[in-house]
Amino acid sequence: MEKIGLKYGLLTAAALIVYFFLMQLLGLVHIIELRFLNGLIMAAGVVLAIRAYKKVMEGNIPYFKGLGTGLITAVVGTVVFAAFMVVYVKTAGHSMIEMLSAERYFGERVESTPGVVIFSVLLLEGVISGFMFAFIAMQWFKQRQHKVPGAP
């Protein structure tokens, strides 16, 4: 369970980093609404991790173990991505700090402690959304066979 969560967490973090660089390359990093796609990347990572765990368990997946696999994936992916973002902002992201400072929610806090605010916000977003995705995915994966009751 832990190995699968770690593997897919690292893959999820890599996908988030690639997406960030793509957004940076296209000059779209200032569009906050596109962060929604981070959630889709997280959802894909969590679902793939739970699916891989179910495959290893040959279809018999304990509910909380599957939920734990999804949560480990979310935590690992989020921590690695948040750490990357802190390093990026501290080294090359001066324009990003200016952009985030102009926002009304965390603006003044970003100016004083950009690393702490960025890491905290990303960690909170990632872990909460990852847990929700794991919970939703487990409603599907907890069944041994995916058939509609009473269907032929």
Image (tube, helix red, strand yellow):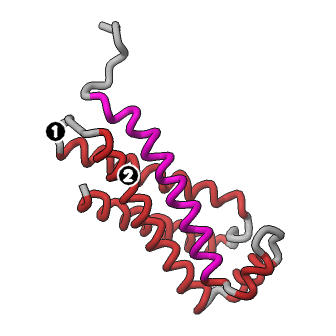
Name the chief secondary structure element in magenta.
Answer: helix
Name the image quarter holding the N terminus: bottom left
Q: Secondary structure at mark 1?
A: loop
Q: Residue at x 77, y 83 (%)?
A: 98
Q: Which residues are magenta?
A: 116-143
**In the figure, 46 relative to 87: above or below?**
above
Q: Residue at x 80, y 80 (%)?
A: 108
Residue indicated by mark 2:
70
- Percent of width and height locating residue 144: 25, 28
Q: Seen from this angle, which residue lies furthest front?
A: 64
Query: Splitting the image into 4 quarters, where does residue 93 fall?
Result: bottom right
Label whose residue precedes the other's in the sequence (2 or 1): 1
Q: Secondary structure at mark 2?
A: helix
Q: Amino acid at mark 1?
A: Glu
* Residues at circles 2 and 1 in contact by the CB criterion of under 8 Å: no
Q: Which of the pair 7/27 is nearer the observer?
A: 7
Q: Which of the pair 119/17 is nearer the observer?
A: 119
On whether residue 121 falls in the magenta region, the answer is yes
- Mark 1 crowd level (few <14, some 14–19, many ≥20, 10 Å Cα): few
Q: Residue at x 38, y 32 (%)?
A: 140
Q: Amino acid at mark 2?
A: Gly
- Mark 2 crowd level (few <14, some 14–19, many ≥20, 10 Å Cα): many
**In the figure, 54 relative to 78: above or below?**
above
- Percent of width and height locating residue 3: 24, 62
- The label shown at residue 58 is 1
- The label shown at residue 48 is none
**In the figure, 111 relative to 48: above or below?**
below
